[in-house]
Amino acid sequence: MTELRRIAYYFRRKHFAMFGLILVLALVTVAVLAPQIAPNNPHAVSRDRFLSPGADARYPLGTDNLGRCVLSGVIYGTRVSLFVGLAAAATSTIIGILIGSISGYFGGKTDAFLMRFTELFMTIPRFVLALIVVAFFGSGLDRLILVIGVLSWPGAARLVRSEFLSH
């Protein structure tokens, strides 16, 4: 219980952390309740194309070039955004834990090689590498998750390695 009190105390004192927590909880709530709170089917096409926001009460944020409700698309889009973020974070964490633990546990030449590889990986511009990977393998949600996850592991690897070396 003392750990829970410490976390509650932290969030009461840190207003930006509380704001971030509320924002994440709101996004998760919107994603979970998307079918109940979306005014329309996000894939339904209507004849009302290019409606401006507020022009029709049925489409509060207007419609796109196919006549789809923009607000419904945004609400359902939170599901995809949260899924990509969580899956990419899990991917980078798994890769980072594997490389960092192998490096910290074995040490010596293995550690030196893996840490130089990590440093080399950190010097490559992420955006350029992401463009190259997407151009080579094509686009898609699974490839996007993989690219973000593979480009984000060095920090986790260095943290895990330092924990192994400190014990």
Image (tube, rainbow, N blue to C red):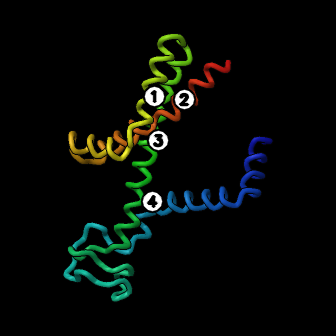
Q: Is residue 85 toward the left or the right of residue 160 in the image?
A: left
Q: Residue at x 50, y 60 (%)?
A: 27
Query: Spatial distance from mark 1 to mark 4, Cα to Cα?
Result: 35 Å
Say if mark 2 contacts mark 1, CB within 8 Å. yes
Q: Amino acid at mark 3?
A: Ala
Query: Spatial distance from mark 3 to mark 1, Cα to Cα?
Result: 17 Å
Q: Amino acid at mark 2?
A: Arg
For disc 4, the marked residue is 31
Eyeballing the image, is 14 above or below 101? below
> Which structural element holds mark 2?
helix
For disc 1, the marked residue is 118
Which residue is more in the foreground, 125 or 57? 125
Query: Spatial distance from mark 4 to mark 2, Cα to Cα?
Result: 33 Å
Q: Residue at x 55, y 57 (%)?
A: 24
Q: Residue at x 46, y 34 (%)?
A: 153
Q: Nearer the viewer, mark 4 or mark 3?
A: 3
Query: Spatial distance from mark 2 to mark 1, Cα to Cα?
Result: 8 Å
Disc 4 crowd, CA 10 A, few/some/many (<14, 14-19, 20+): many
Find residue 160 and report its image quarter: top right
Disc 2 crowd, CA 10 A, few/some/many (<14, 14-19, 20+): many
Q: Nearer the viewer, mark 4 or mark 2?
A: 2
Point out residue 135 in the picture as x, y percentages from the top left corner. Answer: 22, 44
For disc 3, the marked residue is 89
User: Residue 158 — which label?
Assistant: 2
Say if mark 3 contacts mark 2, CB within 8 Å. no
> Which structural element holds mark 4?
helix
